Image (cartoon, rainbow, N blue to C red):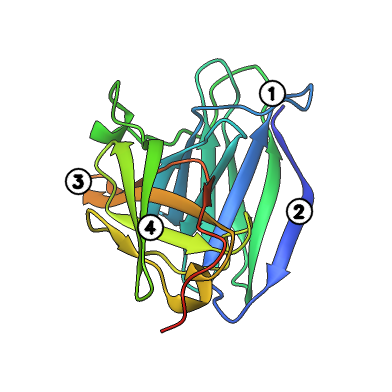
Amino acid sequence: MAAASAAFSFSATAHASQFGVRVVDQAGMPVEGASVCFGLQGSYQQFGTAFTDEQGQAIAEVPNIPFVVTVSKTRFSGIRLNEPGRGFNLVKQVTLAEGIPGPRCKAGSTLTDAGSSIKISNVEVVANAQTTVLTPIVSGEPTEYRVGSSDSLDSLQWRAMDTSILLPRALAGLDEVYLQLRRYEGTDNGWIEARSKSIQVYLPASYPSL
């Protein structure tokens, strides 16, 4: 029988719009590629759908109202959770057991096709006294990015992706930053998301005075 455990991590934040799941099997191992739907009763994909990553995680932006999360994968018993509206970000651990299908989430889209995941192979850094520009070498056609001073990026807002990323001065003066990309788009089945891993980007340690 599928079951959900207590939440394992959360952070209070002014942006009360993110809810995620970390899906594991009965041995506690992450389940990659599980389908996750975020929505309302009768409209289970309204707020988006996603597939869990290598850590078993999938995260979506949801309004601060009660909503429903459906998690499923072939060979496992699906589960549907009723979640209250919250004023903080939350990642909840969900355990899937092998068995009859149960509730199902259909998160299929072109984002799941072979070669369409978001992967960063390299980041070129061009810096001078005025600007620091990152140019990711990436596959999967990302639409948004976020960059910060630590590998904890969940509280940061996504920004529209261009070929290159101009760092704000507060980050440009650091020795390193962390970058994550995603593709986020609407389909006939709702909103679909694919994310890259967060990667560390080394920057020049100092800059000449203006």
Quarter of the view holding residue 27: top right
| Residue type at tag 1 | Ala
Residue, disc 4? 145
Res. 168 mark: none
Q: Are marks 2 and 4 in contact (CB under 8 Å)?
A: no
Across and down, in percent, residue 91 comes to 66, 54
Q: Which residue is mark 2?
A: 7
- Which type of secondary structure does the marked residue at label 2 adopt? strand
Sequence-first disc among 2 and 3? 2
Helix, strand or loop status at disc 4? strand
Q: Name the spot of residue 47 as percent of width and height, x first.
A: 39, 58
Q: Which residue is mark 1?
A: 97
- Mark 3 sits on what residue? 188
| Residue name at image x 78 percent, y 51 percent | 8
Label pair 2/3, CB-CB below 8 angstroms: no
* Amino acid type, mark 4: Tyr
**Crowding at label 4, few (<14), some or many (≥20) Cα neighbours within 10 Å?**
many
